[in-house]
Image (cartoon, grey):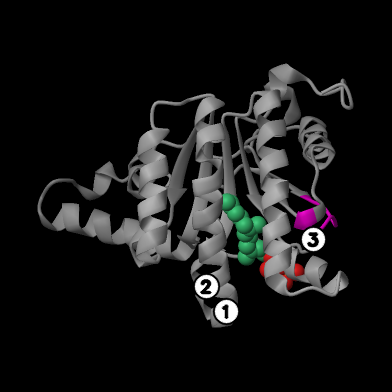
Amino acid sequence: MSTFPEIDLNNVPKHIAIIMDGNGRWAKKQGKVRLYGHSIGVESVRGTLKAAQKMGVKYLTLYAFSTENWNRPKEEVDGLMNLLAQTIVNEVDELDESGVRIMCVGNNSELPEYCQNELAAAMERTKGNDNIHLVLALNYSARWELKNAMKLFAQEYEEGRCQLEDLDDEKVHSYLATKGIPDPELLIRTSGEYRISNFLLWQIAYTEFHFTDVLWPEFRDTDLYKAVLDYQSRERRFGLVSEQLK
Ligand code: FPP
């Protein structure tokens, strides 16, 4: 933290979500295949998680694989699934020791079985940890999540277990993949793209955005600190006027 002593540790986002983008472009610049970019991207995940832990962030959500990513070349999809499972296997001891709880949001049942098994084992093993929650968005898209939420509500309604009037913000939240996880205060997207790409659409209603040109494999702890400083420079009004916040 000595690099950024100006960070106010009493005003660190409880939940940071990241769209890790630019692995492919970074690999191309190195004259390497896309998968190489993803594998170096894992190093950035490691550093970012440590930096987030150091600041006292409680939830770090990473967009690791979207429902649209299945349409990439088979070799890349297979490679990404292997990388995910292998990373979990390699890292789970250290993650567990440092109090990380691994969680997943997304339609897990469509992931390859070996991935599902490694994820389930890691989630079970780390379920008692609460230093930080590492939330992996895997086979996730916000539209999938919202459609799923609507189906769950319709089912409860049809069975007479709830009324239309029951549908408030809290009730909607209870149908989401992120049930029990607070909304992110800060969303970061790397690689100079200014899009949300079907990520956490319900949850980002009042989230602050930080966009950086840095490609994900080059994202370092200092980039995370910069994003948090940027967040701390904002006035979050939640629809009110400045004077009401004083
Ligand atoms: C986007 O870059 C990145 C992804 C779709 C995959 C991200 C996955 C990792 C970094 C591995 C994560 C591992 C763990 C354990 C969380 P892109 O391929 O779209 O880059 P481009 O826009 O430059 O082509």
- The local crowd at label 1, few if under 14, some if 14 to 19, many if 20 or more residues have their Cα within 10 Å, is few
Disc 3 residue: CB within 8 Å of ligand 1 = yes
Q: Is residue 235 left or right of residue 92?
A: right
Front position in the image: 200 or 162: 200
Instruction: Locate the C terminus by quadrant.
Output: top right
Tell which tag, 1 or 3, sits nearer the viewer: 1
Identify whether 50 is placed above or below 160.
Answer: above
Label 1 sits on what residue type? Glu
Q: Position of residue 158 (x, y in %)?
A: 13, 58
- The local crowd at label 3, few if under 14, some if 14 to 19, many if 20 or more residues have their Cα within 10 Å, is many
Q: Which residue shows up at 54% across the image and 81% down it?
A: 74
- The local crowd at label 2, few if under 14, some if 14 to 19, many if 20 or more residues have their Cα within 10 Å, is some
Label 1 – label 2 distance at C-alpha: 5 Å
Q: Which mark is residue 191?
A: 3
Range of the magenta residues? 211-217
Label 2 – label 3 distance at C-alpha: 23 Å
